[in-house]
Amino acid sequence: MNIAHNLEALEIPMRFGTNESIIHPVLIWDEKEGATLIDTGIPGSHAAIGAHLERLGLSWKDLRRIILTHQDIDHIGGASAIVEASGAEVLAHPDDIPYIQGERMLIKWNPARLEAMLQAAPPEQHERVRRLFGAPPRVRVDRALADGERLPYRGGITVIHTPGPTPGHIGLYLSADRLLVSGDALRAENGLLQGPSPQMTPDLPLATASLRKLLSYPIERVLCYHGGLSAPGALARLRELALSA
């Protein structure tokens, strides 16, 4: 999905057991800074992401950095294979780095969740599920990101620490596009912004407080990992979500 010049929301199929959906890693690129990938999908997503690069006239050698919005398996699962293919550096918030690097168990991923997924999946999918999700993904993080830090890509990308979905969850504000890449802080349903998923948000009150932090940015659109691009009027809807709780 093209968002603007040299700004794409990739559409990557994701299957957890019998549940299928589309997730939206983000790709930004230019000749000077190379390509930046925001989030990497579930384990095994690197092939689909590589196909998108090729479609856009890019290759793994053009990918210089990966920004991980947080530690969830559907955001970091493809990172190790992508780093191996590209040599890209990995950036993340320090509060999630121990989980991303495998020093701690992912907050939302444990043997009980794997067993529940196996029970929900048809028997012929069990081997695939174990192969993809049996061992928690891990990748080395090369650089820690600070709240409020401005990255020098695409005219400036501001890191916004938005804990709640995980301790080190971040959003990214692309000032030139007035676009928020929200990670899991927000969802979109038919273009309408929704708050974070209660089932997947360990600290919902903190996540709601994080939404209030976003109101200081002149956001026109939101790109949600789950649901894609929001309809116009994102800031008014964001204010409604942030102040209604």
Image (cartoon, grey):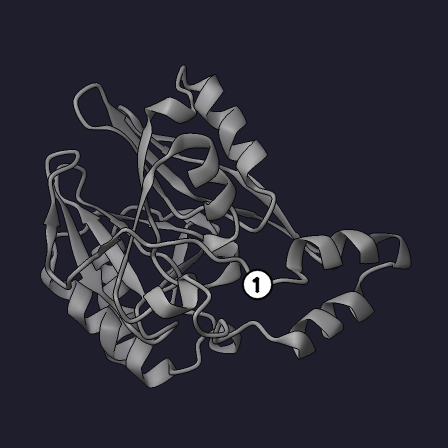
Front residue of 230/140: it is 140
The quarter of the displayed image where residue 127 is located: bottom right
Residue 50 position, x and y percent, is 50, 28
What residue type is disc 1 on? Pro
Residue 19 position, x and y percent, is 69, 57
For the C terminus, give its image quadrant. bottom left
For the N terminus, give its image quadrant. top left
- 240 to the left or right of 108: left
Front residue of 159/216: it is 159
The residue under the point 24% across, 78% down is: 209
**Element type at mark 1:** loop
- 237 to the left or right of 104: left
- 108 to the left or right of 88: right
Q: Residue furthest top?
A: 57
The quarter of the displayed image where residue 89 is located: top left
Tag 1 residue: 136
The residue under the point 53% across, 25% down is: 51
Rendered position, 159 above or below 206:
above
Can I make out residue 1 in this image?
no
Can I make out residue 115 in this image?
yes
The quarter of the displayed image where residue 151 is located: top left
The residue under the point 12% across, 57% down is: 217
Residue 210 position, x and y percent, is 24, 73
